[in-house]
Image (tube, rainbow, N blue to C red):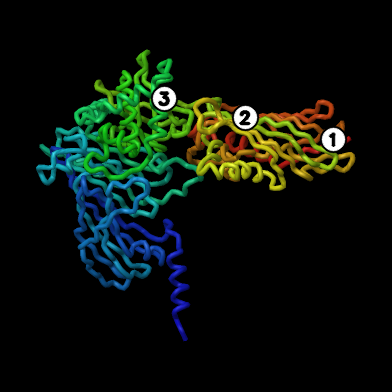
Amino acid sequence: MSYKPIITALAAVFFALPATAQHKTIFFDSTIVRMEESGLSHVVNHRRIRANDFAGCRDLSCVKVDYEPLSSYVEFTTAVVRRASGRVDTLSTEAYDYVAPARLIYWGASQKMIEVGHLDPGDEVEYSTYRKGFTYALLRDESSSDERFVPPMRGHFYDIVPFWSDDPVEEKVYRVSVLSSKNLKFELYNCDGGAAAPVRIDTLRTADWVTYTFTKSGIVPLRREPAALANNDIQCKLLLSTSPNWEAKSMWFYGVNEDYGSFVPTPEVKAKVEELLRSAATERDSIGILTHWVADNIRYAGISMGPGEGYTLHKADMNFTDRAGVCKDKAGMLVCMLRAAGFKAYAAMTMAHERIDRIPADQFNHSVCAVQLRNGKYEMLDPTWVPNVRELWSSAEQQQGYLMGLPGGADLMYTPISTPENHYIRIAAKSAIDKEGTLSGAITITAEGQSDRAVRGVFAGRTAEWRQNLETELLRIDPRARITKITHTDNDKYLEQPVTITYEYTIPKYAIVDGKTLVFTPFSARNFYGRAMSHLNFNTDPASRTQPFADACSRLVQISDTITLPDTYTQFHYPYICGVADPAASFGCQYWLEGDKLIFAETVMLGKRIYEAADWPVFRQVVKNQQTLAHTPAILTK
């Protein structure tokens, strides 16, 4: 008898098991930090984890630690396996060092890992690591071996400590010792959750040092609701920083890039700016032209370019020559070009899709640009998020924190809500139903802002695929449709006008006509171009939520439809749906007869990107109303 098929089948099941919170239990997670005068920190982490089942054994068969070789050092100091049988196996701490898996950004991040080997359910892995340094690499003098591990803002310390976990944690401890002169600030966020044990804070002071110990027991994985905000926005976290305020961080960020010369325009950059702005008539023209040139011509490619990754922005000559880079390269290129045009422009930092809180820890993952207008006000620009988008700052980033790097310093600010009218979807249709039930007509969709971006997605890829993509949007509503003509605006001239697409079509047997009765659903009500209405993807089954949630953007949907009927009908039955009127979300619809015509109108308004849990009932009702109209026919009788 061959055991190979059985072993193969068992292996397939083993490696297909999902990793969930039940597969492992963390008995303790201890982090001890000691900060030097320069800001360099020494960190010792100690963890003990039990594999509860075979999936947990799989996850713990190799222990990995991520680090950035240019700015941090890490090593395993101890590692043992405590078998369920009582045996203790000591593992080698000689680690493998590999380049970390990456996508889009290839900056040389690495992983150190030790092989644990075979485990059985109930076995425990206990290990400790030593680390020094910080997260991001920066340009700096490397004459001293430890100099490259000093943090970006020299002499200061910050940390972001999640007191949440995807696995149960019996006890988590974070202890930090700083010099008394450093004036460490800290704040706990989202940590008052129900019956969970609070974070205990202990303080020990000596003549030269202050040691803070934060302890939390019984951490239970959160059951996240769909479309919930980032874990750090809704679960317990600790922020620490010795930076006095955001203004100090702002001035530091300004200074580090000015000192390096990140934004000095070369003759080639000046010539390009002069060429681009020949047709500019206003301040707004110039800003728009330069922003979209950078957005469309500096491709996103995060290849390591040596020292200078992280908070130091690369110089303009390299960005302009390579025409490639990540967000900071695109932002730096725009700052340089705006300055060449005579504007006062500065780099800024933000945190995409996660809240920045008041403690000035480095809560940033994205770089953007700020330009000062002639009236003295600043406008935010993001060339990374607006390729082929009619906005200068993507409204998918509304309600988002940012910090400008200004010579006199700036406080943390948040982008405002973009009104739904800035992101409208307008669907206008005219059609006729004949006595055989065939629907013939034309339907036009026009969109602006982020809705324009979503609709315009049909033009992604090769031009040869556009026709098929366009047809798919109508055929997904009714596969029987015969499209006779499609016209649309020039996608290459997206800045000249919002996207508009018109379909002329015929759908046989679309309506039921039996002499006295006509049954059909207006084609325009059936969520045409749902790709631009992400709210329709929400599961509306739960009647309530406990967690805030996010949609792609604020949005306005307006539908108007006139259908010529095959006869005159005197009675009309249509889905009765109560309107919704709320600042967060609203809905209204109308049907009426005018002779042999049925007229239909619908309006959906979604007021923001980030919603509180209390907004869910009205948001849910609006989505349910739109879906009901899309799937419920109207009935007309003589």
Q: Name the residue under label 1.
A: 566
- Neighbour tally class for label 3: few under 14, some 14-19, many 20 plus, Cα within 10 Å: some
Horizontally, is 622 left or right of 50 in the view?
A: right
Q: Do the residues labelled 2 and 3 touch (CB within 8 Å)?
A: no
Marker disc for residue 426: 2
Q: Distance between the residues labelled 2 and 3?
A: 27 Å
Residue at point 47% right, 30% down?
Answer: 395
> Which circle's residue, 1 or 2, is located before the other in the chain?
2
Mark sitting earlier along the chain (3/1)? 3
Q: Position of residue 186 (x, y in %)?
A: 27, 36
Distance from Cα at disc 1 to Cα at disc 2: 27 Å
Q: Where residue 157 appears, x then y in whole percent?
A: 21, 38
Is 14 displayed left or right of 259 in the figure? right
Q: Distance between the residues labelled 3 and 1?
A: 52 Å
Q: Secondary structure under badge 3?
A: helix
Residue at x 33% of width, y 23% of height: 338
Dot 1 amino acid type: Pro
Q: Identify residue for label 3.
A: 289
